[in-house]
Image (cartoon, grey):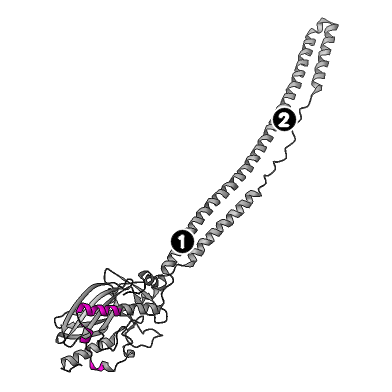
Amino acid sequence: MTGRLPADEIRKYFLDSPDPALLEASERRLYDIEDLLDSATRSLETFTPMPPPAPSPLPEVRAHPGYYVSAMAVLAVGACLLMISLWFTVIALVCLVASIALVHSGVSSRTEERAERDRAIVTAEEAIAAHQKRNEMVLSNLQRQVDQLTDDLDHAREAHQDEVRAYEKDFRRTEPKPSDEIMDRTLLDDIRSVKEHALVRLRIHPSELVRPSYMRKMSMADLENAPANTPDIHDPFVVYGPAYGANYPVWCAFGPGRYPKKRYSRYKVMVICTTRYQVALYRCVLDFFTGNLDEETMSEYHYADVVAVHSETDPDSARKINIQAPRKSQRHLHDIPQAERYFELVVSSGDRARIVTGLTRRRTGGGYADDENPQHFQILGNDPNFDAVADSIRMMLREKKSGTDIR
């Protein structure tokens, strides 16, 4: 299987491309933080401290000469009375005490005014200090906001770079996707390689193969729904379909179009070699990513032991289907009720060689308004039906069991 697409290239077909909206959202977050930082930086650079409030006028410390003049006058009166007569000694003492009281009152009044002025000075200084503190706090908050936004911007840039790297990694992992034509060609090349490998494992030479006589007039158009099969008499029959089980799902991706073709990550393949005396089967699982084969089995049956060949739909098989849609954009397409369409060869011993060839869509109620197919089931996603292969095997059995010589 040389020259086939690498596994990583085929895997791209089954994966959604990364959503550019996620990267755009990351860029918007980065731009928003940059705008906030620019605004905060301008506010910091243009910050002008508020001027302190106008100081209130300070109380005056006035001199009070009236107290001293009155004290001198009272003292002089007392001295005069004492000089006139000693009988006025008591009055002179009273005048002395009164003069002292007047002097004390003058001193106390001046002291109170000075204290009030000092308190006014302290209050003004406290107001200026509080105003300066408010300016410093505003400046500090602006600086802290700028520092925080700077850190946020650094983190946002790192996160954006990580997201860009992750986006580019996902993009390289999912794009460019191989075309539908390349996928079809790769699958058919793999199936042809499986057919060649089957002949080797079954030890059958192409010259030993025979076909029913009616196939001599068939063309490739008659085998349109049975890919990888040809009218060539020396080419074995082959049928294939999705390889899934109860514990191992298979990936599925849809091609474009109204009735898109379904492609799977693993295929079960059955190669049917009809020889002159017997029918030989080779079965395996094809890993579509790598082209490797697994679970190989081989068996041979005489024509007389083959009792039936079926190509039909199992209406009770929905619970067996184990399909995963790695493309989120296509998961809604898997919500349609489905059933298995299978190819089966039955022998008299009870052995059944069955292989699922595709999935059908179950019609419900009156069916789909846009669908004119009256069948209860219809092929879903353009899976091949291999009816032509089943018909050929049946004709082969009829001719062999009727004794018709096939040349």
Residue type highlighted by circle 2: Arg
Question: What's the residue at 28%, 69% (across, down)?
Answer: 248
Give the extent of the magenta segment: 191-214
Q: Position of residue 31 (x, y in %)?
A: 56, 59
Q: Position of residue 371 (x, y in %)?
A: 39, 86
Above or below, comparing residue 50 to residue 330 in the picture: above
> Is residue 197 covered in magenta?
yes
Find the distance from the CA under tag 2 to the CA under tag 1. 71 Å
Assess whether mark 1 and mark 2 are in contact (beta carbons under 8 angstroms): no
The foreground one among 24 and 71 is 24
Where residue 350 sits, quadrant-wise, is bottom left
Does residue 286 appear in this view? yes
Question: What's the residue at 69%, 35% (across, down)?
Answer: 124
Q: Position of residue 252 (x, y in %)?
A: 35, 74
Q: To which residue does mark 1 refer?
A: 165
Main secondary structure found in the magenta portion:
helix
Q: To which residue does mark 2 refer?
A: 117
Q: Secondary structure at mark 1?
A: helix
Q: Nearer the viewer, mark 2 or mark 1?
A: 1
